[in-house]
Image (tube, coloured by chain):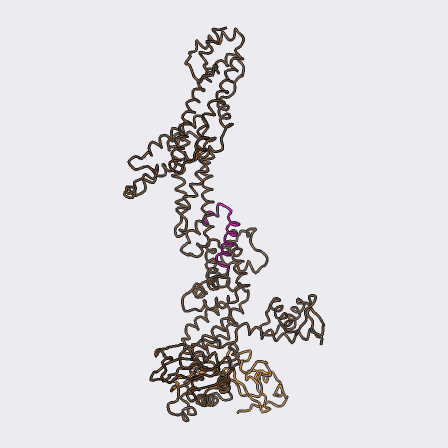
């Protein structure tokens, strides 16, 4: 009995709580076995040995293994790099020790198994399982930090060795520190670190712990590195495609590193080892998706900048396109873009022109991203709404940029009109031929009306016009702008305008732009008539000597925007000349006469004052005012206002121009005096060249609309007299029914509502309980 | 102070000298053209009848062509005669 116990203690020191292993040969074990069998305790002893091993694991090995992980968490080292280095070592030591003990226990286990085989029963458990489970049962929270540090350090070393091969050597030499291990170049530890790293991974693989201990951290780390890499290489850099390089980076560097970890330190994969290959492939797939997702998200997050930089940023869009084929990013893209448009474009601080530029850029970018235009439509809905609701000057801005002298996106787009038409036809044909390639709209497409699907494929100008949904508005605004330009710049070059007009006609149709055509014709006709009249008998025979040269722009009033009704009295001298001009015209044209619009036009005058000469181009009103100061040096505002036939307030504003020139002063209230004495305080610059002070000569589009609506007022009055009271919808319907022949009928219910509301404010209507009534008096 | 006007450009609109504003046939203003034309004035002139009524030339000609027997002024039903003023 005693002898047997001693033998047992010798063969298995673990039974007396010693973590040791004695090399024993088969004979000794067999002998021990026989004795134990004779004592009938073999079963018990085998189980006892198992328990003892398990105990040692739980009470000694595992706690000792985890101990440094706990300790390290407590001390906080200020230097991050040093800390990581330190953690690297801790992990390395812990694993090495664990591995040594694992091997030892394994050897003991072999002997115990031999004993078990003698009993003929299944008595012991799978050692590896127990090892793993007892290890993980005591897992500390913070252990991932250390594992992370371990892999992070080695990853950096690895990347650096890879980069070394690619980069210029000169560049590398300039650095004192090694990029990998961050030690001085001379003391570079990279190789050592690589060796240690390979060794540890091998240990982990042998213990079957690689996945359990490092798997999660590893994935996390790599994802992090992918993210950082994307940020580093691609952020703010849209003019090259990155996706290929990123994939290459992932396939070569990251996967090679992974392969090394899983494949015992070598990067060459054994083709027969399908298990490793499979897990690497699996990793690769996961990481590739992750890469796509992160890259696409980084593009989407910077989408506004990409829009601004388009078309330079086209490569980024191409990348995103590729990503979107693999991942469903539509919802995210729409949301992000909508938000960034809102925060960066749609607020008070941005000019309407800039919003339109942004809108055009968005259209172009999204067109490039997606041909069908569904995303575009969803994303730009807020822009359209904002422009429609908050920006009154949208139309004007668009029209201005359409016809501007300086090249702009829209002007270019307009010039492309014909090409686009042809393109569209081509596309329609294609669509019919390739009907098999048709695919339905995605579920998130706006499908509320037929109009949308029609507009989706139309060009940029149509999309802009689509903001308001009516061509008339744009054409009207164009007409007003054109009239303004023509009136201000009387001797202009008509060719460009004619070209513009032709392009616009292609776009909006001949009918709508007819009056603009007449306007341009009026200009050229005027030149001809002018020349004729100035040479005619009637005009020249009575001409005085040194008469100012006159000319006139003769317009067909029906086709021009309405002139303001305001008028004024010209100086007598000028009046006489223009009377003569009119007579000559009547003679020339027969049965036709002229009505002067005295306020419009421009005057070139030379003023001689205080031995100085001023050469100015001014409006007729300004010329008339200064003319009157020629003979009378002081004027009361009121008396001048009667002479010129101009309201005092307007007159005062116009005198302001001469005050600025230093020619007139207001000495007392409403008393204006010419400064022609040599006074020190009215110094003038001799070379003042002021171009026309721009005044609005036309009734604005808004006022004009007002007038149009006024036409319907009589209809509304009639309706309400007969039917007593009506709700808004019904009035709108009735007007549509009865008054649709009139010009400019197209108005919305909203427009009618605001019109009626104004009538309510003017006490011409009563609004109560949702119906409009005439006030009872 | 002496002011010398070098050039004075003014703006005017032309008007028919007639006793009405609209053409009695097409109801357009005289200064506008008849529905078949696109330019007013020289391209779409007015004509005067002895009865003192005025129409776009194109309008009254069309009207007269559509009359089978008598050539009447559509406004006063007198026989239409052009007044060459």
Q: Quadrant of residue A742?
A: bottom right
State which chain is coloured orange: B
Q: Quadrant of residue B26?
A: bottom right
Quarter of the image where the C terminus of chain A is located: bottom right
Residue A266 visible: yes
**Residue A210 x/y as whole percent:** 45, 30
Q: Nearer the viewer, residue A161 or B12?
A: A161
Q: Which residues are magenta?
A: A320-347
A366 vs A677: above or below: above
Question: Magenta segment: does it hold A84?
Answer: no
A139 vs A117: above or below: below
Please indicate whether residue A130 sits to the left or right of residue A262 in the image.
right
**Residue A647 x/y as whole percent:** 52, 82
**Residue A351 x/y as whole percent:** 47, 63
Q: Quadrant of residue A277?
A: top left
Residue that appears at 69% across and 71% down: A773
Question: Magenta segment: does it hold A335?
Answer: yes
**Residue A140 x/y as whole percent:** 49, 31
A95 vs A82: above or below: above
Magenta stretch: dominant secondary structure = helix
Residue A418 visible: no
A215 vs A721: above or below: above
State which chain is coloured brown: A
Q: Nearer the viewer, residue A358 or A240?
A: A358
């Amino acid at each position: 009995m005693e002898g047997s116990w001693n033998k047992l203690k010798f063969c298995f020191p673990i039974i007396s709580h010693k973590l040791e292993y004695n090399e024993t040969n088969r004979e000794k074990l067999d002998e021990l076995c026989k004795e134990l069998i004779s004592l009938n305790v073999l079963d018990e002893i085998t189980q006892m040995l198992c328990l003892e091993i398990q105990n040692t694991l739980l009470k000694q090995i595992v706690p000792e293994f985890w101990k440094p992980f706990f300790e390290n968490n407590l001390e906080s080292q200020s230097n991050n790099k040093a800390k990581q280095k330190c953690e690297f070592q801790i992990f390395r030591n812990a694993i090495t020790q664990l591995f040594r003990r694992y091997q030892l226990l394994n050897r003991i286990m072999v002997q115990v198994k031999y004993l078990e085989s003698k009993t003929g029963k299944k008595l012991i458990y799978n050692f590896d399982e127990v090892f793993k489970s007892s290890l993980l049962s005591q897992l500390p929270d913070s252990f991932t930090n250390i594992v992370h540090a371990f892999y992070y350090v080695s990853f950096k070393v690895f990347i650096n060795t890879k980069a070394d091969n690619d980069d210029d050597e000169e560049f590398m030499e300039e650095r004192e520190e090694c990029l990998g291990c961050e030690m001085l170049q001379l003391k570079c530890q990279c190789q050592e670190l690589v060796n240690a790293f390979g060794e540890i991974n091998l240990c982990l693989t042998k213990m079957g712990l690689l996945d359990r201990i490092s798997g999660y951290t590893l994935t996390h780390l790599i994802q992090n590195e992918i993210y950082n890499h994307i940020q580093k290489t691609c952020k703010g850099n849209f003019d090259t495609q990155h996706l290929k390089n990123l994939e290459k980076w992932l396939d070569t560097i990251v996967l090679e590193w992974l392969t090394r970890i899983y494949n015992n330190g070598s990067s060459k994969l054994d083709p027969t080892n399908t298990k490793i290959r499979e897990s690497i492939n699996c990793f690769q797939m996961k990481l590739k998706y992750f890469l796509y997702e992160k890259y696409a998200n980084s593009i989407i997050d910077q989408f506004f900048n990409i829009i601004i930089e388009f078309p330079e940023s086209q490569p980024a869009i191409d990348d995103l396109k590729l990503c979107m084929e693999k991942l469903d990013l539509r919802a995210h893209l729409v949301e992000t873009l909508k938000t960034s448009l809102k925060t960066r474009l749609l607020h008070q601080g941005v000019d309407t022109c800039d919003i339109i530029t942004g809108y055009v850029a968005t259209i172009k970018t999204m067109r490039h991203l997606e041909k069908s235009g569904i995303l575009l439509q969803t994303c730009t809905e807020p822009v359209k709404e904002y422009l429609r609701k908050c920006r009154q000057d949208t139309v004007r801005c668009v029209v201005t940029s359409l016809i501007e002298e300086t090249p702009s996106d829209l002007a270019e787009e307009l010039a492309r009109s014909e090409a686009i038409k042809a393109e569209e036809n081509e596309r329609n044909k294609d669509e019919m031929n390739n009907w098999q390639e048709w695919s339905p709209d995605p579920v998130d497409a706006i499908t509320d009306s037929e109009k949308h699907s029609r507009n989706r494929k139309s060009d940029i100008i149509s999309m802009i016009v689509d903001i308001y949904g009516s061509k008339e508005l744009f054409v009207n605004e164009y007409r007003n702008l054109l009239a303004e330009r023509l009136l201000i710049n009387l001797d202009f070059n008509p060719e460009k305008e004619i070209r513009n007009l032709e392009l616009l006609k292609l776009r909006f149709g001949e009918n709508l732009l007819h009056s603009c055509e007449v306007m341009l014709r009026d200009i050229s006709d005027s030149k001809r008539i002018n020349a004729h009249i100035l040479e005619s008998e009637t005009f020249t025979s009575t001409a005085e000597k040194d008469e100012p040269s006159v000319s006139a722009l003769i317009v067909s009033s029906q086709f021009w925007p309405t002139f303001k009704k305001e008028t004024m009295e010209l100086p007598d001298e000028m009046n006489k000349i223009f009377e003569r001009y009119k007579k000559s015209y009547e003679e020339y044209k027969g049965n036709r006469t002229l009505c002067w619009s005295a306020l419009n036009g421009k005057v070139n005058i030379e003023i001689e004052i205080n031995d100085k000469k001023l050469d100015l181009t001014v409006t007729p009103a300004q010329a008339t005012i200064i003319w009157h100061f020629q003979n009378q040096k002081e004027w009361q505002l009121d008396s001048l206002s009667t002479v010129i036939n101009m309201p005092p307030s307007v007159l005062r504003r116009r005198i302001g121009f001469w005050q600025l020139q230093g020619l007139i002063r207001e000495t007392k209230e409403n008393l204006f005096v010419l400064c022609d004495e040599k006074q020190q305080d009215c110094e003038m610059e001799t070379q003042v060249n002021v171009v026309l002070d721009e005044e609005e000569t036309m009734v604005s589009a808004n006022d004009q609309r007002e007038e149009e609506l006024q036409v319907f007022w009589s209809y509304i009055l009639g309706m309400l007299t007969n039917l007593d009271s009506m709700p808004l919808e019904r009035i709108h319907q009735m007007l549509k029914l009865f008054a649709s022949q009139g010009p400019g009928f197209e108005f919305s219910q909203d427009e009618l509502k605001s019109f009626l509301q104004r009538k309510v404010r003017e006490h011409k209507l009563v609004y109560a309980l949702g119906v409009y009534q005439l006030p009872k008096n | 102070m002496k002011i010398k006007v070098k050039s004075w450009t003014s703006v005017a609109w032309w008007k028919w000298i007639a006793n009405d504003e609209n053409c009695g046939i097409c109801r357009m203003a005289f200064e506008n053209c008849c529905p078949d034309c696109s330019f007013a004035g020289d391209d779409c002139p007015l004509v005067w009848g002895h009865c003192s009524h005025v129409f776009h030339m194109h309008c009254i000609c069309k009207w007269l062509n559509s009359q089978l027997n008598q050539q009447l002024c559509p406004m006063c039903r007198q026989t239409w005669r052009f007044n060459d003023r």
